[in-house]
Amino acid sequence: MKKIKVFEVGPRDGYQNVSALIPTQEKKKIIDGLAKSGVTHLQVTSFVSPKAVPQMQDAREVAVYCKEHYPKLDILALVPNLRGAKDACDAGIRHISYVVSLSESHNKANVNRTREASVRELKEIAFSYPDMKICVDVATAFGCPFEGKPADGELIRFVGELYSKGFREICLCDTTGVANPRQVREAASAVMETYPDIEPAVHIHDTRGMGLACTLAAVEAGVSRIQSTLGGLGGCPFAPGASGNTATEDLVYMFREMGYETGIDFEELLKLSKYQKSVIEGNYSGHHVMITAPQACGKRGGR
Ligand code: ZN
């Protein structure tokens, strides 16, 4: 039975798009529920400026809580820069996600610098924190709201650049949900064939209802690491048209029914998704609706 590693990124990717502050206690409760359901890889927060993303102002508290209560789980945080990496490290985090967009325009809109500058900072983080595991999230890997589809070979060239700098954990992110299953299968296969020691993951938004199909296409091509959010929360404030991520419960159900092993209890997860919905009711109205964050501006590392 093929094993799928599910990376739940809702407490970061989902919550950063909820405008009303979710009480820290509730975040912890939902993380408890995720752990109880059998989720073992959790991206729990992001170390961004609290001015830019007030929702993440409790990053340290959430991270410390998770590291204390779940020392055996893979606890990740997103960091947009060196400062964020320092804060994450101080909070005990040893596995971070760092976002770089394949498209220059999206990188500018998302983190206000060139792609080259982003890669430079990534190298600095790796140099300053040699024990930190780093997952590089390649945003707009399959298309960008400003530039359209990447040129032929552009993704693999960029992955090659990251590879040459020593990065092996790479996530192909469909930031605005424009990918199709064939494109995802071909891209994932190309990455794995060219760089057999890269551990690719996929992170697919569900804008056109193709989240399940695209994620499955990646898995059938050999990918075993996937990112998703409970309840399909998410979006990207700097990518017009981006809607939520593929819902973790939908993926877990699909994989269970198809005989893949995720180690996650679907029924528990579904209950938790309903609970989460009640917590953020009013700010959340389903997978396919963009959740706006009117207060958001500046660096937040969305993808
Ligand atoms: Zn996302």
Image (cartoon, grey):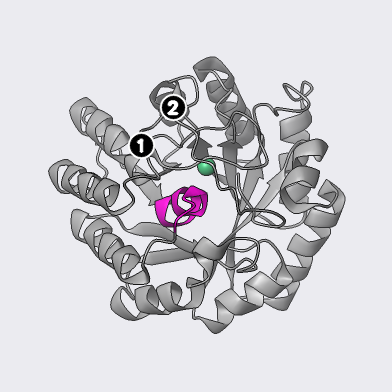
Question: Would residue 130 be visible to someone looking at this image?
Answer: no
Asked if the magenta segment contains residue 159, the reply would be no
Measure the alpha-carbon separation of dots 1 and 2: 8 Å
Q: Which residue is mark 1?
A: 247
Image vertical order of residue 216 relative to residue 235, above or below? above
Q: Is residue 209 left or right of residue 25?
A: right
Label 1 vs 2, first from the N-terminus = 2
Q: Dot 2: few (<14), some (14–19), or many (≥20) neighbours within 10 Å?
A: many
Give the camera-side residue of 241 and 60. 241
- Type of amino acid under label 1: Ala
Which quadrant of the structure image shows residue 23? bottom left
Residue 149 in picture, x, y percent from top left = 72, 21
Asked if the residue under mark 2 is in contact with the one under mark 1, i.e. CB atoms within 8 Å, the reply is: yes
Which quadrant of the structure image shows residue 46? bottom right
| Residue occupying the point 50% across, 18% down | 181
Magenta span: chief secondary structure: helix
Residue 204 in picture, x, y percent from top left = 50, 33
Q: Which residues are magenta?
A: 10-20
Q: Is residue 32 left or right of residue 99?
A: left
Residue 217 in picture, x, y percent from top left = 45, 23
Q: Is residue 12 left or right of residue 296?
A: left
| Residue occupying the point 60% across, 44% down | 303
Q: Is residue 36 left or right of residue 137?
A: left
Tag 2, which secondary structure? helix
Q: Which residue is mark 2?
A: 211
- Type of amino acid under label 2: Gly
Asked if the magenta segment contains residue 17, the reply would be yes
